[in-house]
Image (spheres, rainbow, N blue to C red):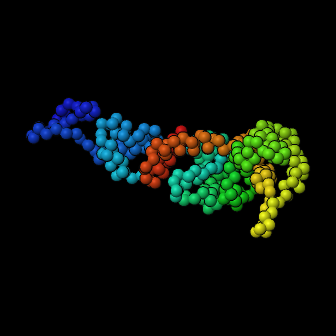
Amino acid sequence: MIRHGYTKLKKQRWRCKKCNLTGLKKRIDVEIRNYKKLKEKWLAEFNSLTKLAKKKKMRRETLSRKFSSLTNQTRLNKLKPLPNKLVLILDGKRISSDDNLILSYEYLSKQPFAWLFDERENFDSWFALMNRIKKDYEVEAIVSDGQKGLIKAVKVVFGDIAHQRCVIHIIRFCLSKLTQKPKTDAGKELRILVCKISKIKTVSEVNEWKNSFWKWDEKHKDFLKEKSINPLINRSWYTHRKLRSVRSHIKNSLDNIFLYVKNDKIPKTTNYVEGGINSPLSELLRRHRGIKKEEKRLLILSYLSNRRK
């Protein structure tokens, strides 16, 4: 074989002296490795398969067939140096009807820390992730949106660890029940208190807010006990159920709303995961809609690995 010019893609062409046939020398292992890198790059970016095939001067069907033949695997980048005690932001993301991402994000080093895939986001999935983390690392605090299974798993694995509830989730839930223009005086007063939560920065402001809330609760406790009755079916219910729901939500999370005030290492929201990871990941999944479950997981692994750089 002798050199015989280059192809349009600037690859070396070879010619046989005996039969004058020309071709390219290909190593199967190198070709597979290159296609794996190309697939990971495609999944981690917003380009469509059609655009990528056009750029590589191939048919879309050919490139899709090449990708489908590859085993789904990716290498994870190593973690950045971690602090002695971790501050974890926990959040789950629905990938498909039967698959969820259970994710932990290390706040102090600003990187995805540990994760797993499960059919549901519940106690078992969160317990499995936290139990795995506890074996090798010491956790100082946790921040979450307050999912029931997550709260229970934190108590079982870490006991009385500082567990900051996401302030934005609390405010959002309360305002959805109170509406923009409450009709009752109790609703109007409580809405003003809820809107002040995100502005609190000092211990004195925390104590003042808590005192205002308990005064509100004492002032309207009889009003919140009012019931409506249907004499036809002999059934009664609390008249102001949404107000009671907001009050219960605040009472249940009151000890965990303002932990960030005493410890500046603890963030008060899960926005680093919600907006920093989940939002771009949702856009990637939307751009690559139609890919198989295994490819979705490969996409997520590639994305999270890149976020560790």
Can the viewer see residue 252?
Answer: no
Q: Is residue 249 left or right of residue 97?
A: right
Residue 81 position by quadrant = top right
Q: Residue at x 36, y 44 (%)?
A: 35
Q: Is 113 placed left or right of 9 in the picture?
A: right
Residue 306 visible in the shown view: yes
Q: Position of residue 156 (x, y in %)?
A: 70, 61
Quarter of the figure with residue 205: top right
* Left-right relation of 172 to 116: right
**Pick the front one: 309 or 201:** 201
Residue 26 image-quadrant placement = top left
Given the current orientation, which residue lies at the most extreme left position?
A: 18
Q: Position of residue 146 (x, y in %)?
A: 69, 52
Instruction: Estimate the x, y position of residue 150 in percent, counting from the top left.
Output: 66, 56
Residue at 77%, 40% (x, y): give it: 195
The one of 221 and 14 positioned closer to us in this rendering: 221
Where's residue 115, x and y in %?
57, 52
**Picture residue at 80% right of the left edge, 66% below the top:** 231
Which residue is at a point 84% across and 45% down the rendered structure image?
185
